[in-house]
Image (spheres, rainbow, N blue to C red):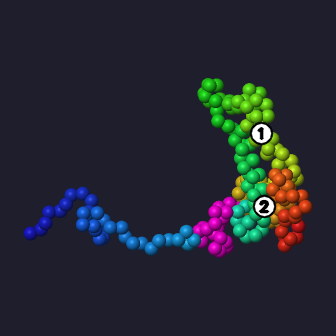
Amino acid sequence: MAGKRRKGRPRKTGPRYRNGNLRPTSEPAISPAAIAATQPHRAGLGDSAVDQKAESELGRMVLRSQISAIQYLAGQRYAAQWRAYLATLDGPRSPQRGHGRGNGCNPADCRGQGSECVCDRAKRSWQRSASVLTPAEILVTARVCCWDIACPLGGLAILCRGLDALALNLGLTGSDKSLCKQRIGV
């Protein structure tokens, strides 16, 4: 005699607990290092592939010892100033002005009057940092730090000079210290 077929979807095969729930299969755990080794942007970093710095081009340059830790910090701060300034250009819209038109912060009638205006302070901060860079340094530094694009061929020396100037301007080092790596011939 044939048994009745159960309605619905058939059960998954595998070992079960006494209550009928399926036991989880013991698949081997994949280490974060193995996952990081398969990612193309982390290739060639070796044991440093799992480091958090490997997420950005500037961080990968530190891990490859192309730039120093102070230059890395200067690049991060420059990128943060750039992002803060961009946020003021297309900031949140004021719901009081109808259909979301217009930026809610105008330096003339801003929440913080005069020098306390957050938008104006972000603009001045970025302009102060950008003013110490030459046009070539601005292009290479923005490409690597802000846009997370690989440093162009022959641009490492320009990037180092730009990051050194930013580190001095931001007060990360004294003026008597040389930050650039000697092996790149700067």
Q: How many marks?
A: 2
As helix, strand or loop, the secondary structure at mark 1 comes to helix
Compared to residue 68, the image places residue 101 above or below, namely: above
Compared to residue 181, the image places residue 136 above or below, namely: above
Classify 10 Å Cα crowding around label 2: few (below 14), some (14-19), many (20 and above): some
In depth, the one of 174 and 67 nearer the eye is 174
Q: Which residue is mark 1?
A: 121
Checking the image for residue 153, the label placed there is none
Q: Is residue 106 visible?
A: no
Does the magenta run of residues contain 52?
A: yes
Q: Give the magenta range.
A: 35-57
> Which image quarter holds the N terminus?
bottom left
Q: Main secondary structure of the magenta part?
A: helix
Residue extending furthest toward the right = 176
Q: Which residue is mark 2?
A: 70
In percent of width and height, residue 12 lies at: 30, 65
Q: Alpha carbon of mark 1 to alpha carbon of mark 2: how far?
A: 24 Å
In percent of width and height, residue 110 lies at: 72, 29
On screen, residue 54 versus residue 154, left or right, reads left
Could you tell me which residue is drawn at 84 percent across and 65 percent down?
180
As helix, strand or loop, the secondary structure at mark 2 comes to helix
The three-letter code of the residue at mark 1 reads Arg
